Image: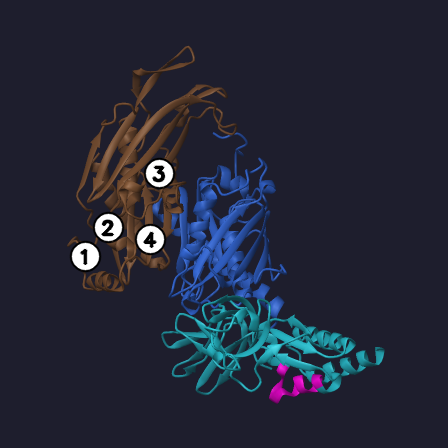
Amino acid sequence: MEDIISEVERDYIASLIAEGKRIDGRGFDEYRPIEIETGIYQKADGSAKVTMGNTLVAAGVKLIVGEPYSDTPSSGVLTTSAELIPLAAPTFEKGPPSQEAIEVARVIDRVIRESGAVDFDALCITEKEAVWIAFLDLHILDYDGNLFDCGTLAAIAALLNTQMPKYEDEMVIYEEKTGPLPVRDKPMETTFVKIGKGIVLDPNLNEEQVLDARLTIGTNQDGDICAMQKGGPGTFTQEEILELVNKSKEKAKELRKLL
Amino acid sequence: MRQMVFPGDEVAEGRVRLGGGVYRDGDKVYSSLIGLLDKKPNYVRVIPITGKYIPKVGDYIIGQVVEQLYSNWDIDLNSPYVGILSSDDFYRRLDPYSTELLEVMPIGTLVYARVREVTPTRKIYLTMRERVARILRGGRVVEITPTKIPRVIGKKMSMINMIRKETGTTIKVGQNGRVWIKGESGKVDIVVKALQKIEREAHLPGLTDSIKDMIIEEREKI
Amino acid sequence: MKVGQPEKFIIDGKRLDGRAVDELRPLKIKAGVLKRADGSAYLEWGGNKVIAACYGPREVHPKHMMRPDRAVLRTYYNMAPFSVIDRKRPGPDRRSQEISLVTRQALEPVVLTNLYPRTAIDIFIEILQAQAGTRCTGITAASVALADAGIPMKSLVPACAAGKVDGEIVLDLFDIEDNFGSADLPVAIIPKTGEVTLLQMDGNLKGDEFERAFKLAVEGCYQVYEKQKEALIEKYGGGD
């Protein structure tokens, strides 16, 4: 996932940020324009398409019935995957998911799971035998940075859009719906990157390519912290981290309003 | 005794010249290695005691021919970087167009050569246009930790000359951790034992004397 | 509720393994345990048994990974099939891929890769026995292995986690606390500046709880750092 970026570009972006400016003219704490569409892929049980600036993520939910895990015999299961498919950027390659794709999927999965967004106990059909298994697949269609926030938004929008198929005589009838997937929370992720001494929200691709360090913070609708992930080759000071944790709650509220 | 320092240890402050194994952060200078602190009033460095051999201009090395391309030999240096020996740098004049270089030095040949140039991207050029450079035939090569080589040589070559004298062997020492020994087989074995002892006890004082005692003792067993 | 969840995690101020809330599990580090590797370290941290090996700087394979201006740092975290109760299928899964990535990023800020252009520095972390906190154990071990290999670096990097059980913030979770507790927060730092090189979190923490857990984990890192230094002093001598 390493696009070649010239030293000139790097210096330019960093010096802009040192002057308090961003390459696309945004404020440091400002998201790019966001648009959400839901229920657009009819074969899925729930779906959404989210654009964040030029980043485009499609999310689909498919439900099947299967056996529960032995340590959680009365809970449903959620499996989140992300694919950085080759059509989304010249540097994405075919083949098994890259470490970056795995990280995106796992960090989004983490905030959904840890916030208790999906009521897994309500997905139990027969204890120890049959539960609903939800596959949440994120397709990155256009990659212009910040897959964490855009992907989480798409994931939650798709989950909220999901209708449960009917289950009768050990058969799933996908054509008939029995009601919405039990979603109790709307967790959000907010991602900040540090470039030189400056820290900006919602990095675009150019900013991601020159970042020193990245911090993604996931919060639930009460403002509790449910997931975090630091990335990038650089570091954050402890003060910066505490400040970003506070800021992320406000920014997550803004995102939640869009749903 | 020099002080042992570790990565991140503060070793100096203010205006000093930096040698290897240290870095500056603000006004302070820190060690970047495990090693021995060499600190003078206006100069500081850390002498590594572990790590790979990284070629420096002027080093004498013992290398092995591993590949031949165009008019060069590629020489393994027991290092992350492969050395390049051009036919122009061979000790006698060769015409690369009419000479089969692999007949002059086939794959596997051992050479004693000098590092002529190190480019910023770490291309390593060697030369054998030196009085002492040569192809090493026969004998035996042992590898020890490259950072222990200065102890094998000793102050003003005291250690290596003592070993040569006491065993009657021919020895070439490469800065890249390789030592070549040629002589009577029993004597060569004694040198190998001595080198292993130096590697183990490099940090102890009075090493030259204890190695000499060991050699004399071993010699009597032959 | 999950199967096997204890009713209480803290009884009379003691945790289920007898520790105080701010106490690390016993930690032993040994530097230079492997012959073939350029540097290595073995850690026993509570019930974790982890070995880390460093090879390099060495030639880069495959060649397209080579960088003309610096060494590439590569990290491989792997769990042995017998390291956990349910046999782990060999090979990299999604979890170990993610841990390999964050481990590299935890160490990258300190390794002076610019000194060795066109080479690779490879770190292999093998989890032989797991009892929660293996990524922190791996990073702590890898950092000692790098130093042991003579790789120039700004500092050692210690790692340690804090978390929440029974509504209390505790240091260094062991497996029962990790499986059934309500938050886990692994952290790695550069001791002399306090900069943070690894930060992950899962679970649920209020803002003030996060701050307390974060500070506790950082304090834990400083304790781990002392053990790292002791291990190097034991092998190489020196110290006071």
C-alpha distance separating marks 1 and 2: 10 Å
Crowdedness near tag 3: few (<14), some (14–19) or many (≥20) residues, C-alpha within 10 Å: many
Crowdedness near tag 4: few (<14), some (14–19) or many (≥20) residues, C-alpha within 10 Å: few
Crowdedness near tag 1: few (<14), some (14–19) or many (≥20) residues, C-alpha within 10 Å: some
Secondary structure of the residue carrying numbered label 2: loop
Which tint was used for chain C?
A: blue
Name the residue at 59% across, 63% down. C231
Q: In the image, what residue type sits under mark 2?
A: Asn
Secondary structure of the residue carrying numbered label 4: loop
Which mark is in front, 3 or 4?
4
Q: Which disc, if any, is residue B185?
A: none
Which mark is in front, 2 or 4?
4
Which tint was used for chain B?
A: cyan
Tell which circle, 1 or 2, labels the residue nearer the N-terminal end. 1
Which tint was used for chain A?
A: brown
Q: Which of A102 and B178 lies nearest the eye of the viewer?
A: B178
Q: Are marks 3 and 4 on the same chain?
A: yes
Q: Are marks 1 and 4 on the same chain?
A: yes
Magenta stretch bounds? B153-164
Are dots 2 and 3 in contact, CB under 8 Å?
no
Tell which circle, 3 or 1, labels the residue nearer the N-terminal end. 1
Chain letter of mark 3 equals A
Judging by the rendered image, the residue that carries numbered circle 4 is A2
Q: Which disc, if any, is residue A204?
A: 2
Judging by the rendered image, the residue that carries numbered circle 1 is A22
C-alpha distance separating marks 3 and 4: 18 Å
Q: Position of residue A98 (x, y in %)?
A: 39, 45
Judging by the rendered image, the residue that carries numbered circle 3 is A82
Q: Which of A111 and C122 lies nearest the eye of the viewer?
A: C122
> Quadrant of the image for the C terminus of chain C?
bottom right
Tell which circle, 1 or 4, labels the residue nearer the N-terminal end. 4
Tell which circle, 2 or 4, labels the residue nearer the N-terminal end. 4
